[in-house]
Image (cartoon, rainbow, N blue to C red):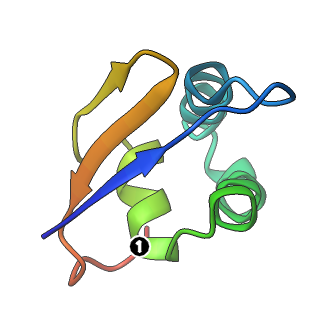
Amino acid sequence: MTTYRLGSSPAVHTPGIIAWAINGYHFEEDRPQLRKVIVDTYSLPETAADQLLSKSVPYSVDGETVVFTVNEDAEPQ
């Protein structure tokens, strides 16, 4: 298990970006591009981004930071 903390910056409000990406992840045809945006923006492995965006794992917001824990062995959808 690995815990990730995705911080915000003056240009990017991470809780808002993650909520936007989760909303769009419901549409299967949009998943690869949304996953790529999150992987590239936060330097995450694809499996971690998929688990977060598909809501396979819960996340919490600590101030302006998104915190979640993933199973590294899970395959992306």
Q: Is residue 39 above or below residue 11?
A: below
Q: Which residue has dot 1 on it?
A: 47
Q: Is residue 72 above or below residue 51?
A: below
Q: Amino acid at mark 1?
A: Thr
Q: Secondary structure beneath disc 1?
A: helix
Residue at 76 percent of width and 56 percent of height = 37
Q: Is residue 71 above or below residue 72?
A: above
* Residue farthest along the right direction in this orientation: 11
- The percent position of residue 33, horizontal first and vertical second, equals 78, 59
Quadrant where the N terminus sits is bottom left
Quadrant where the C terminus sits is bottom left
- In the foreground, 62 or 55: 62
- The percent position of residue 47, horizontal first and vertical second, equals 41, 73
Residue at 21 percent of width and 84 percent of height = 73
Residue at 43 percent of width and 15 percent of height = 63
Tag 1: Cα neighbours inside 10 Å, few (<14), some, or many (≥20)? some
* Residue farthest along the left direction in this orientation: 1
- The percent position of residue 72, horizontal first and vertical second, equals 24, 78
Residue at 61 percent of width and 50 percent of height = 28
Q: Is residue 35 above or below residue 64?
A: below
Answer left or right for 2 relative to 67: left
* Number of marks drawn: 1
- In the foreground, 25 or 36: 36
Q: Give the image quarter of residue 62.
A: top left
- The percent position of residue 38, horizontal first and vertical second, equals 66, 54
* Residue farthest along the bottom direction in this orientation: 73
